[in-house]
């Protein structure tokens, strides 16, 4: 659904990125502020003034979200949770956490600081706006400050709704977690509430649309859809992390994988291996030792009529950290590499010996089996 985010700048060591969808949204917000909200509250200003106010309002919104997400990231770092960075996309910001918080208190602090920071920005904007009004600042400046004050109150309140993964849902999860000492149970409940709240927004959106209020209706519908899917996804990710934490790569790999000898031609490789097994990459062996990897992409970069002249060994590249994992590593480590690199199959390597292959497909099959068993247990 979303493209590759554009990197904007770094602050406190966190990379701030922006999704293309956000640029579209920014244009829409500027337009609706300049032609709707501001002219309604501040009458008879020149057209250019409304556009300046709209632009300033959008930049203010952007900064408000960055500050909100940044406080999450700073507290996370304080508790030793590594953060990938902050990406702004169509529904606001996401501070990307790579791990679960270590204990309920860390989760609580991390979650609550976001709405608190929005509350502070709101208060600050209100005070500044009051100062502006009493000391005769231009109405355009006061108008933008007033808008930011209300915007941040809405951000704080919306995020406090106890629907996981909204901040309020995280606060709820931390409370449940500290009560029963079971993060899986707590996440399950919080995610169910989050998912239910998502459905509520979807229904509300449909009611709006049917009654003729198309734009706000679509808006609620999309937010609901997004909340529902992230709530379900975060629960599944937690189950996956819990399951793969207890497994080693060794337990999940396929032994004796398909390997390609160095000396055959690319033509033979395509005919006898690629058409038969349909994998993206293959390990290349010479005298029983792993010497490299060959992928379909590498073959495709060579003109077809030259396939007979090249051997696999001449085209293969050395195996890198992006395509290999050790047999004694956690299965989670394999998942993390797959996540980062987009490779769905990793070679399991000890020294120059190929011990097996671990595939995302097999890991997901195990996960879905495990989830079905969980459901059975629940329904007993
Ligand atoms: Zn937040």
Image (cartoon, rainbow, N blue to C red):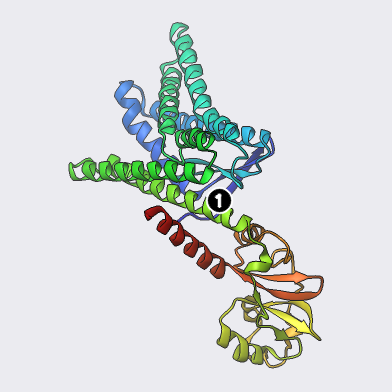
The residue lying furthest to the top in this view is 134
Q: Determine whether 344 is above or below 209 in the image.
A: below
Q: Which residue is mark 1?
A: 5
On whether ligand 1 comes within 8 Å of the CB at mark 1, the answer is: no
Task: List x then y, in percent, for residue 379.
Answer: 37, 55
| 240, 342: nearer the viewer | 240
Residue 321 found in image quarter: bottom right
Label 1: state its secondary structure.
loop
Task: List x then y, in percent, for residue 296.
Answer: 62, 79
| 366, 140: nearer the viewer | 366
The residue lying furthest to the front in this view is 380
Task: List x then y, in percent, for residue 149.
Answer: 44, 22
| 122, 273: nearer the viewer | 273
- On the question of residue 368 being in view, the answer is yes
Residue 293 found in image quarter: bottom right
- On the question of residue 44 being in view, the answer is no
Task: List x then y, in percent, for residue 99.
Answer: 61, 46
Which residue corresponds to the image point at 38% horizontal and 55% vertical from the top-left? 380
Q: How many marks?
A: 1
Assign the N terminus to one quadrant of the image.
bottom left
Describe residue 284's horizontal placement relative to residue 188 as left or right: right
Which residue corresponds to the image point at 64% horizontal and 85% vertical from the top-left? 303
Which residue corresponds to the image point at 45% horizontal and 61% vertical from the top-left? 373
Is disc 1 surrounded by few (<14), some (14 to 19) or many (20+) residues within 10 Å?
A: some
């Amino acid at each position: 659904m979303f493209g590759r985010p554009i990197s904007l700048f770094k602050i406190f060591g966190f990379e701030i990125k922006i999704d293309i969808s956000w640029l579209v949204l920014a244009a829409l917000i500027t337009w609706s502020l300049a032609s709707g909200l501001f002219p309604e509250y501040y009458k008879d200003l020149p057209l250019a003034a409304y556009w300046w106010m709209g632009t300033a309002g959008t930049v203010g919104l952007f900064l408000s979200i960055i500050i909100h997400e940044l406080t999450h990231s700073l507290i996370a770092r304080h508790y030793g949770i590594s953060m990938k960075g902050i990406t702004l996309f169509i529904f606001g910001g996401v501070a990307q956490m790579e791990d679960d918080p270590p204990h309920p208190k860390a989760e609580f602090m991390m979650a609550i600081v976001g709405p608190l920071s929005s509350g502070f920005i709101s208060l600050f904007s209100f005070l500044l706006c009051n100062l502006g009004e009493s000391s005769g600042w231009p109405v355009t400046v006061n108008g933008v400050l007033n808008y930011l004050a209300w915007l941040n109150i809405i951000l704080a309140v919306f995020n406090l709704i106890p629907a996981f993964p909204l901040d309020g849902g995280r606060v709820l999860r931390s409370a449940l977690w500290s009560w029963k000492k079971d993060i899986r149970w707590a996440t399950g409940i919080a995610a169910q509430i989050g998912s239910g709240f998502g459905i509520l927004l979807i229904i509300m959106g449909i009611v709006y649309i049917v009654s003729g209020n198309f734009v706000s209706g679509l808006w609620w519908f999309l937010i609901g859809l997004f909340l529902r899917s992230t709530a379900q996804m975060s629960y599944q990710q937690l189950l996956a992390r819990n399951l793969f934490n207890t497994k080693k790569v060794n337990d999940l790999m396929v032994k004796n994988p398909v390997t390609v000898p160095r000396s055959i031609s690319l033509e033979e490789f395509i005919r006898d291996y690629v058409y038969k097994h349909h994998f993206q990459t293959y390990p290349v062996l010479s005298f029983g030792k792993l010497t490299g990897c060959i992928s379909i992409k590498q073959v495709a970069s060579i003109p077809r009529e030259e396939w007979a002249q090249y051997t696999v060994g001449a085209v293969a590249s050395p195996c890198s950290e992006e395509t290999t994992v050790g047999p004694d590593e956690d299965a989670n480590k394999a998942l993390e590499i797959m996540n980062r690199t987009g490779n769905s199959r990793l070679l399991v390597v000890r020294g120059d010996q190929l011990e097996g292959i671990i595939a995302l497909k097999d890991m997901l099959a195990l996960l879905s089996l495990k989830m079905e068993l969980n459901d059975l247990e629940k329904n007993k």
